[in-house]
Amino acid sequence: MALNERNRQKFVAGMNRRIAELRVKTEESLDFAIDTMFQERVEAYLRLEEGLAEVDRMLNVVEEDIDEARELHAAERLESRLEFIEDRFDEFDSEIRQRPRRRRKKINLFNFFKAAGGGGGDPTAAKGEINSAGEAYSALGLEFGSPMSAVTRAFRQQIKKIHPDVRKGDRSSEPELRKIIEAYQFLKDDHAAFPSEPSTSGG
């Protein structure tokens, strides 16, 4: 049975809305995982991050097929696929959030890894190399003023390359690791204190 144009447009709009919402939730889950799971198991974080990346890839496939769905059975099939993806996300998200469910206390990742490396606990006593937003963006390989989503993405990618747990215990990259963590924490605190407002002009 063919969908009439009005119903097809409602279907497309509804599916696109659900996909957009799920993408936002996925980013929020990854952000939460960074702030909580690195304290316990980096390997578990990497596994869950890959699972959420797969969720995003599946969303892309569904999204590409939405506009082509002009028959009722095709629309139902796509909706079933999206429901499956939503269920997969819920599985990953619940595993991520089974640790502290309320993020009341901010976790200073730089301080955590510094202490883990035997460097002591006072973050002000041994300030690292990052003293400005410009230095933080540069350390993460980003242009100055990049959005927090890009900061988080760059941080995740670099951590996956140099963290000792990923390198089978090789700690030779710890100085670089501390610098990256400090840069991420600096920019995260900066964005929290001065959240950028949505741009309303072309400049």
Image (cartoon, grey):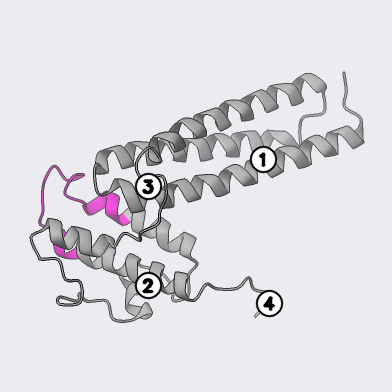
Q: Which quadrant is home to the N terminus?
A: top right
Q: Residues within 10 Å of mark 2 (few under 14, many from 20)?
A: many
Element carrying mark 4: loop
> In the image, what residue occupies the spot 75% across and 39% down?
14
* Three-letter residue code for mark 2: Tyr
* Three-letter residue code for mark 1: Arg
Q: Nearer the viewer, mark 2 or mark 1?
A: 1
Cα gap from disc 3 to disc 1, whole angstroms: 22 Å
Tell which circle, 2 or 4, labels the residue nearer the N-terminal end: 2
Element carrying mark 1: helix
**Residue that badge 2 annotates:** 137
Relative side of 127 to 203, left or right: left
Q: Nearer the viewer, mark 2 or mark 3?
A: 3
**Residue that badge 4 annotates:** 202
In the current view of this chain or complex, which residue is farthest to the left?
Answer: 118
The answer to the question of whether label 3 and label 4 lie on touching residues, with beta carbons closer than 8 A, is: no
Q: Is residue 127 above or below residue 3?
A: below
**Residue that badge 1 annotates:** 18
Cα gap from disc 2 to disc 1, whole angstroms: 32 Å
